[in-house]
Amino acid sequence: MGEAYLKFQLASRVPAVFAAKSVEEATILPTSQVTAIPNMPPCMLGLVNRRNRVIWMAHLVRLLGMPVPDRPTQQYSMVIVKAGSSLGLMVDSIDGIIHLGADDLQPPPPQVNPILVPYLRGCATQDNQILLVLDAEAILQSSVFQS
């Protein structure tokens, strides 16, 4: 059956997954629940209180250095990943759980943006789509969070 992964849209028509074991929660929350903090990197949306814990929330597309469409929104689709610490990541939409076998993971094809490569465990193909298999630990180790 393979390992469980949370599938989501990183951006419009850019499907991606996180290993389910690195996902703490996937939810939708109103933008009003995110408290913006001044003087933060552009990818940082602010702080959010989840289950009596305050965690940072970042815009994943912006964090990964990809172009961000300017669309106003009333709510965020948020995936909280954990690898030592926890971080909320805004994604385009959450699609559910899929299963991938170890043999489904392949190296990224040449058309994958080189900016993404340090954050990938690989890629997989499902329903004629290339899924980006993101590495939560690599994202949490991003230089953005080291300053």
Image (cartoon, rainbow, N blue to C red):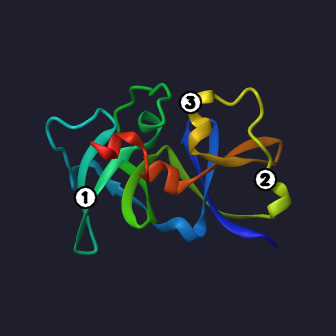
Label 3–label 1 contact, CB within 8 A: no
User: How many neighbours does mark 1 have within 10 angstroms: few (below 14), some (14-19), or many (20 or more)?
Assistant: many
Q: Residue at x 64, y 44 (%)?
A: 15
Left or right relative to 61: residue 108: right
Q: Which residue is mark 3?
A: 115
Mark 2–mark 1 Cα distance, whole angstroms, equals 33 Å
Identify the mark at residue 105; answer none if there is no mark.
2
- Which of pointers 3 and 1 indicates the residue nearer the eye? 3
Residue type at mark 2 is Leu
Residue 85 in percent (x, y) is at 37, 64
Depth check, front residue: 62 or 126: 62
Residue type pointed to by label 3: Ile
**In the image shown, does 38 or 85 lie closer to the viewer?**
85
Check residue 48 in the rendering and tell me which mark sits there, or answer none. Answer: 1
Q: CA distance from mark 3 to mark 1?
A: 27 Å
Measured as percent of width and height from the top left, residue 53 is found at: 24, 70
- Picture quarter containing residue 94? bottom right
Where is residue 26 drawn, in percent x and y? 47, 63
Determine whether label 3 and label 2 are within 8 Å by CB. Answer: no
Residue at 59% across / 67% down in the picture? 20
> Mark 3 vs mark 1: which is more N-terminal?
1
Q: Nearer the viewer, mark 2 or mark 1?
A: 2
Counting other residues with Cα less than 10 Å from the Cα at mark 2, is it few (<14), some (14-19), or many (20 or more)?
some
Depth check: give the residue in front, 5 or 71: 5
On the rendered structure, is 24 left or right of 131? left
Q: Secondary structure at mark 2?
A: loop
